Image (tube, rainbow, N blue to C red):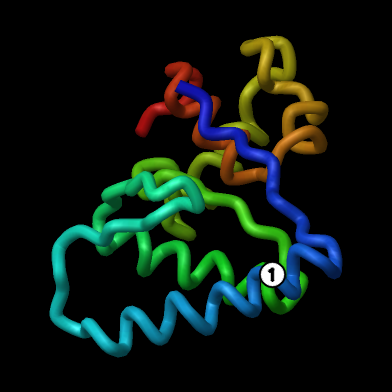
Amino acid sequence: MSVAVSPVIPDAESAAAAAEALERVQAYLRAHPDGPATVRLADDDGGQLVVPRAAVELLSRILAHMANGHGVSVVPAYAELTTQQATDAMKERASAPRDSHPRATLGLFTSTTTREALWTSMTAGSLSG
C-alpha cells in the first residue's frame, strides 16, 4: 500500500476559511473536553455525518496549520519512521548496488519525500525492517 500523499497547500482564501473554522472547532472541543466519543456534523440540507472525536481533534490541528498558510499532509502512523529507522534505511540504501532494485534510483527521492520513499521501499521488501 502506498503512503505517498500530496500536501494541501492553502491559498489566501482557504487559509482565511481555515482560521474561521478553527475558531469554531476549538470552541466546540473546549466546551466538550470529555467527549462525546463521536461528533455529529450537519450539512446545509439537514443531513448529518457522524465522525469520531479524534477526527475532529485532528481536524483542529490541520486547520491550525492551514490557517497559518502551511501545507498539510496526513500520513498514517504506521508509515512514520523513527530517526534510527531512517538512518539505517538510508545507510542500507546507500550501500546497495544502484541496479539492485527498481526504486534504488535517486529519482525516487526527488519525486516524493524521503520518509515516503523509504516506507515504500521497506513495504516492497527491498529493505529489512
Task: Tell me where residue 73 appears, x and y as whole percent.
Answer: 60, 51
Instruction: Please identify the quarter of the rendering in which residue 117 is found.
Output: top right
Mark 1: amino acid: Ala
> Residue drawn at (44%, 75%), measured in percent from left and top?
25
Vertical position of residue 103 compared to residue 106: above or below: above
Label count reads 1
Q: Nearer the viewer, residue 129 or 13?
A: 13
Task: Tell me where residue 41 appears, x and y as whole percent.
Answer: 36, 57
Instruction: Please identify the quarter of the rendering in which residue 29 is found.
Output: bottom left
Graded by Cα atoms within 10 Å as few (under 14), some (14 to 19) or many (20 or more), the crowding at tag 1 reads some
Q: Nearer the viewer, residue 100 or 42?
A: 42
> Residue drawn at (31%, 88%), measured in percent from left and top?
30
| Left or right for 20, reference 59 | right
Q: Quadrant of the N terminus?
A: top left
Vertical position of residue 36 compared to residue 128: above or below: below
Residue occupying the far right of the picture: 12
> Residue drawn at (50%, 35%), measured in percent from left and top?
119
Q: Which of 51 and 120 is in front in this view?
A: 51
Instruction: Please identify the quarter of the rendering in which residue 82 is found.
Output: bottom left
Vertical position of residue 10 compared to residue 105: above or below: below
Residue receiving disc 1: 17
Task: Tell me where residue 109 appears, x and y as whole percent.
Answer: 74, 36
Task: Tell me where residue 84 appears, x and y as whole percent.
Answer: 44, 56
| Left or right for 95, reference 53 | right
> Residue drawn at (73%, 19%), measured in percent from left and top?
98
Q: Quadrant of the C terminus?
A: top left
SS class, disc 1:
helix
